[in-house]
Image: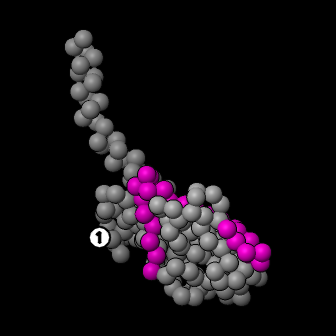
């Protein structure tokens, strides 16, 4: 009985630290996925010789981003947790939804950007911010050349330079 009580107390003490670790790992993996998707969008625009667009929108109670070809405003995030809805001239390349139960939020300085098929540049430049419930954040900053750099405000996350 004493051993079980001690194990229970130790588990109760370790649980908050474990929750913080899980949240941090979700933030890190989502930031890596976002950066890879942005690099993919630039490469896809160049390879396909088509404009590739990134659209960041609210979706249901969370938010999402869609990478697609086609005209501006051709794709929207789904409200009911399904796939994105697109017009006939658009092709979805990637979709990523952020469920608030995962305690992550995605915000952007621009709702939509376009990757140029000739030079790989973007219009307009943007910063995408992934934030967890503890206030830690990773920013994906895209310059006019379409390149992405990731940083953390105040260097709060090890391995990321300060923004």
- Which part of the image, by quadrant, shows the C terminus? bottom left
Image vertical order of residue 156 relative to residue 91, above or below: above
Residue 95 lies in magenta, yes or no?
yes
- Which part of the image, by quadrant, shows the N terminus? top left
Instruction: Name the spot of residue 144 as percent of width and height, x first.
Output: 54, 87
The way the protein has been coloured in the rendering is one colour
Q: Is residue 77 left or right of residue 14?
A: right
Instruction: Name the spot of residue 4 as percent of width and height, x first.
Output: 27, 17
Instruction: Name the spot of residue 126 as percent of width and height, x first.
Output: 49, 81
Please state which of residues 64 and 115 is positioned toward the viewer in this rendering. 64
Q: Is residue 34 visible?
A: no
Instruction: Name the spot of residue 121 as percent of width and height, x first.
Output: 61, 86
Residue sitting at x 52%, y 72%? 57
Q: Is residue 81 left or right of residue 109?
A: right
Number of labels in the image equals: 1
**Residues drawn in magenta:** 85-109
| Quarter where residue 15 is shown | top left
Residue sitting at x 70%, y 83%? 71
Image vertical order of residue 29 relative to residue 10, above or below: below
Which residue bears the numbered disc 1? 154
Q: Is residue 136 left or right of residue 148?
A: left
The furthest residue to the front: 80
Q: Residues within 10 Å of mark 1 (few under 14, many from 20)?
A: few
Residue sitting at x 65%, y 60%? 83
Residue sitting at x 36%, y 47%? 21
Residue 29 lies in magenta, yes or no?
no
| Quarter where residue 69 is shown | bottom right
SS for tag 1? helix
| Quarter where residue 122 is shown | bottom right
């Amino acid at each position: 009985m004493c051993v079980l009580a001690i194990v229970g107390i130790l588990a109760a003490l370790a649980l908050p630290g474990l929750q913080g670790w899980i949240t941090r790992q979700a933030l890190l993996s989502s930031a890596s996925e976002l950066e890879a998707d942005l690099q993919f969008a630039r490469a896809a625009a160049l390879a396909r010789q088509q404009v590739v667009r990134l659209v960041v929108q609210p979706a249901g109670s969370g938010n999402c981003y869609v990478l697609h070809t086609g005209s501006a405003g051709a794709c929207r995030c789904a409200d009911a947790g399904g796939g994105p809805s697109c017009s006939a001239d658009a092709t979805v390349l990637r979709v990523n939804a952020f469920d608030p139960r995962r305690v992550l939020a995605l915000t952007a300085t621009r709702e939509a950007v376009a990757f140029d098929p000739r030079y790989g540049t973007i219009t307009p430049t943007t910063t995408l911010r992934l934030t967890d419930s503890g206030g830690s954040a990773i920013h994906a900053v895209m310059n006019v050349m379409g390149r992405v750099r990731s940083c953390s405000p105040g260097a709060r996350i090890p391995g990321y330079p300060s923004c």
